Amino acid sequence: MRTMTASFARLARLVPALVLACGVLLTLAHAPAQAQEHERQPLVADLSRHLVAITTGFAGTDVLLFGATDEPGDVVLVVRGPNRDEVVRRKVRLGGVIWANGPAVTLHDVPAFYRVAANRPLEEIMSPAARERHQIGADTLNLRMSGDVAPEDRAEFREALVRLKESRDLYTVGPGDVNMLANRLFRTELHFPANVPTGTYMVEVYLVRDGEVVSAEITPLIISKVGIGADIFQFAHEQSALYGIAAIIIAVFAGWLAGVAFRKK
Amino acid sequence: MQIYLPIAEMSVNVFLILGMGGAIGFLSGLFGVGGGFLMTPLLIFIGVPPAVAVGTEANQIVASSVSGVLAHWRRGNVDIKMGVVLLIGGLIGSFLGVILFKFLRSLGQIDLAISLSYVFFLGIIGSLMFLESLNAIFKSRRSGGVPAKRGGHRHSWIHGLPFKMRFRKSKLYISAILPLAVGVIVGVLAAIMGVGGGFVMVPAMIYLLGMPTQVVVGTSLFQIIFVTANTTFLQATMNQTVDVVLALLLLVAAVIGAQIGAKFGAKLKAEQLRILLAIMVLGVCAKLGFDMMSTPTEFFTMGIGGQH
């Protein structure tokens, strides 16, 4: 009898959350059936779009992430770009006069883009150990390194990588804002700058209670060049000889056109 | 209005690029130089990767040289035979230059190589031009408007070299090795610095080869077309660093700017023009030199790995 009342109370508490969640999902043109499917899940999240197209006029964009939780908890999200190798070089002074690139370290499988957002400061939400486990926060990224630098100096290169990525708006170390509504609904704008690398991104949403991750959802997001820009890039890389010839022909024609046009005046 | 550059992989303001193209075009029309030595550093300054700036600028110079050479061609101021010899050297040089470029890029030293070549060549040519035009201004003041005259043919070891050739239009009978060597050096510079090399070639043709001034510009432009076309092709195939969108934006504005510049240039005296150009060249040189020597605020740089 007591368990029944408890579950009833639980259900009653869930109703407004579900109504709200349905509302959000409906307004964003999602079928209500989908909401029902997620009924028993502690965490539901989705993106306003799953493809970011880099067109000729691209100057950065925002993608809306929204979702709902079954019960109050903290929401942490991580956006991870495609992995690649990065070379970090330290400048050294040559002959006491000129600064030139010196020792280099290659960092393997570095996310090209990395962003963390949470509804309140990360340290208040999770223990360092839990952050480490899920690689939440740029300082916890598991990066392999190789290069002609002593292991004890490598930490410096790693910090430099994060700092350089940050300065290009590709990493954010401090958590961004996740807005909570009525303790159940959350939303945030994910910003992608104009220099965002292309590829498949993973948007990971974690529901955290008492410092531990209780549920997670991963949504892919594809960022790719489309239209003329994509065609030009593909042309330049796949048929580079033809591309080079085309570039020369365009230049010769443009120069000739200009020479002729201005002579008549 | 922003436009995304597909090869540079960055978004830039169209009007900034058009403005830059127009301004450099104006200066190149005013002074009769290609302007590559100003445009490439400027592109790097606004954040275009140095490799892309160099490759794209070579492409743009093809266009500006074609439009420039047409006027000289009509006046018969192109020494084709000399141009072809310079060109053979230039093609060898630009091939070597692109290989060197790729090698330096893999070492992570391409930025330094570009800056160093700029400081070195701009420094020498800027100082020479400055002194020479200052001299000319003083002389013309003293002797009432007679421009400085260059000395006649000097006979030195240079004239003892084999493979002598007759260049009718340039009124020269010299060893083919000489223009060939000038071509090679300029070709290497064109590939590494993203310039046509006119600012090195024109003085070399006048002072080293002893060519008459009226055929120098036309012949150098004629040669530059082919060397920069070759550089464009090599950079496109070996490094994939030619951004046609950027090149087109730059050249449209530069062509218009050059016409306006040329009209202005006609109103100024030659010595005044040269001294202004010298000051500008020295200014760019000083800026690049200062950047290389001053303690950087960030000691680390980052580049994508796996490029070999």
Image (tube, coloured by chain):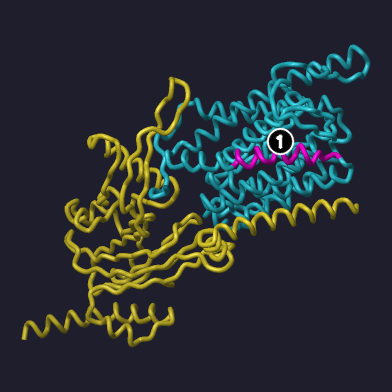
- Magenta stretch, residue numbers: B77-94
Height in image: A56 above or below B273?
below
Height in image: A163 above or below B14?
above
Which corner quadrant of the image does residue A33 belong to? Answer: bottom left
- Local packing at callout 1 (Cα closer than 10 Å; few below 14, some 14-19, many 20+) is many
Q: Which chain is cyan?
A: B
Q: Nearer the viewer, residue B69 or A208?
A: B69
* Residue under pointer 1: B198
Let me know if residue A116 is in the magenta part: no
Q: Please state which amino acid type lies under the numbered disc 1.
A: Gly
Percent position (x, y) of residue B209? 75, 26
Which residue appears farthest toward the right when viewing the image? B144
Q: Residue at 74% of width from left, 43% of height from top? A: B25
Could you tell me which quadrant the N terminus of chain A lies in?
A: bottom left
Let me know if residue B83 is in the magenta part: yes
Q: Nearer the viewer, residue B93 or B58?
A: B93
Which chain letter goes with mark 1?
A: B
Percent position (x, y) of residue A150? 25, 34
Q: Residue at 78% of width from left, 17% of height from top? A: B154
Whether residue A265 sits left or right of residue B190 in the image: it is: right
Q: Secondary structure beneath disc 1?
A: helix
Q: Which chain is yellow?
A: A
Whether residue B64 sits left or right of residue B115 in the image: it is: right
Q: Main secondary structure of the magenta part?
A: helix
Which corner quadrant of the image does residue B29 belong to? Answer: top right
Height in image: A200 above or below A30?
above
Percent position (x, y) of residue A185? 32, 71
Which residue appears farthest toward the left when viewing the image? A1
